[in-house]
Amino acid sequence: MVMNLKLNNNFEKNESAFHALEVNMLLKIYSSQNGKAIILNNLSFYVDEGEFVSVSGPNGCGKTTLMNILGGMDKDYYSGSVKLYSEPPDPASIGLVFQNYKDSLFPWMNLLDNVKFFYVLSKSYKQV
């Protein structure tokens, strides 16, 4: 599984921002009946505007968890920070499509209703 991230001018930039994306000491821990699993252990990196970054690795290493955090969909990490143009990621302004996108669609909804579903939940929905 490989996920690609391309940053561009689609976001309103804060002039004080130095890097388009900054991840600093990100720590994500999952707890279960069997104990705790550290998924991301003090991960730090930055990406400048226009750079192309790929995230790859074996199943279960934290790629999807990282992308969910970068997309603002998972804010339940233990410590660290994620900044997109000096602000926390806002899921309403980020588009993510995962490899198995068909598994993410609701089969009882038509295409337009699937697309609008996220916006209805985030209260950012505007009539199309």
Image (cartoon, helix red, strand yellow):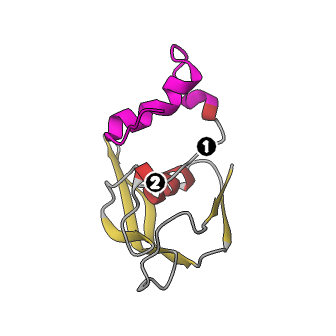
Q: Which mark is residue 78?
A: none
Q: Which mark is residue 93?
A: 2
| On screen, residue 113 above or below 78 | above
The residue at the point 44 percent across, 68 percent down is: 41
Q: Tag 2: residue type?
A: Ser
| On screen, residue 85 above or below 115 | below
Residue 25 coordinates in the image, percent (x, y): 40, 75
The residue at the point 44 percent across, 84 percent down is: 15
Residue 108 coordinates in the image, percent (x, y): 51, 13
Q: Which residue is mark 1?
A: 98
For marks 1 and 2 on the same chain, the one whose residue lies earlier in the sequence: 2
CA separation in Å, label 1 and label 2: 16 Å
Residue 10 coordinates in the image, percent (x, y): 55, 63
Q: Tag 1: residue type?
A: Phe
Closest to the observer, 48 or 78: 48
The residue at the point 31 percent across, 39 percent down is: 123
Is 121 placed left or right of 12 in the picture? left
Closest to the observer, 30 or 18: 18
* Residue 61 visible within the image: no
| On screen, residue 14 above or below 70 | below
Q: Which residues are magenta?
A: 102-128
